[in-house]
């Protein structure tokens, strides 16, 4: 087990080769087909927006309603705090969070939790 290394992660992000988790892509497509608004919330940095969009499209994700990346003022926050704050902002804007999925517990825990949450397996790393 290795400690999460932000600089190595950034190098990997910049390759734009992250594959889709098959079950996530299937759920994503089904939700779009049902007419849900889909927001993608990631811990990737705002400076990686264009490469993240390229990666998402290469992996089969299209037509999302909003892509939220970590801004400068969010640097240094734990993933749970950052994602909780962003979900709270969504709720404050009048959105109901019907479902939430992620491969880290920090994707699902904290404030403004969804009606249903789905934890996906990730044997590679853990983010607090």
Image: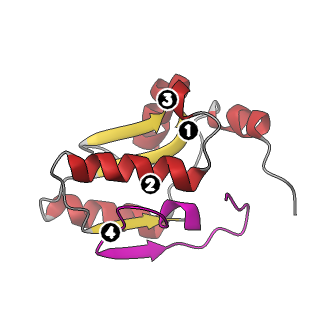
- Distance between the Cα atoms at labels 2 and 1? 15 Å
- Residue drawn at point x = 18 percent, y = 54 percent: 95
- Distance between the Cα atoms at labels 1 and 4? 21 Å
- Distance between the Cα atoms at labels 2 and 3? 14 Å
Q: Magenta stretch mostly in which secondary structure?
A: loop
Give neighbour class at mark 3: few <14, some 14-19, many 20+ (Cα, 10 Å): few
- Residue drawn at point x = 64 percent, y = 33 percent: 15
**Rendered image quadrant of residue 6:** top right
Give neighbour class at mark 2: few <14, some 14-19, many 20+ (Cα, 10 Å): many
- Answer whether labels 2 and 1 touch (C-beta < 8 Å): no
- Answer whether labels 4 and 2 touch (C-beta < 8 Å): no
Tag 3 or tag 1, which sits nearer the N-term? 1
**Rendered image quadrant of residue 10:** top right
Residue 92 image point, x, y percent: 22, 48
- Determine which of the numbered discs, if any, sits on residue 44 in the image: 1
- Observer-side mark, 1 or 3, equals 3
Give neighbour class at mark 1: few <14, some 14-19, many 20+ (Cα, 10 Å): some
- Residue at the spot of label 2: 84
- Answer whether labels 1 and 3 touch (C-beta < 8 Å): no
- Determine which of the numbered discs, if any, sits on residue 71 in the image: 3
- Residue drawn at point x = 19 percent, y = 61 percent: 96
- Observer-side mark, 4 or 2, equals 2
Tag 4 or tag 1, which sits nearer the N-term? 1
Residues in magenta, as a range:
105-128
Residue 13 lies left or right of residue 94; in this view the side is right
Tag 3 or tag 2, which sits nearer the N-term? 3
102 or 63: nearer the viewer: 102
* Relative height, residue 79 to residue 16 (above, below): below
């Amino acid at each position: 087990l290795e400690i999460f290394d932000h600089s190595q992660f950034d190098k990997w992000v910049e390759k734009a080769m992250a594959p889709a988790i098959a079950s996530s892509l299937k759920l994503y497509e089904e939700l779009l087909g049902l007419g849900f608004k889909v927001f993608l919330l990631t811990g990737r940095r705002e400076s990686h927006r264009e490469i993240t969009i390229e990666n998402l499209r290469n992996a089969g994700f299209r037509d999302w309603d909003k892509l939220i990346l970590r801004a400068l003022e969010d640097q240094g926050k734990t993933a749970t705090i950052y994602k909780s704050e962003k979900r709270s902002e969504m709720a404050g804007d009048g959105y109901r969070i019907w479902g939430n999925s992620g491969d880290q517990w920090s994707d699902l825990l904290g404030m403004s939790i969804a009606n249903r949450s789905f934890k996906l397996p990730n044997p590679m790393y853990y983010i607090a």
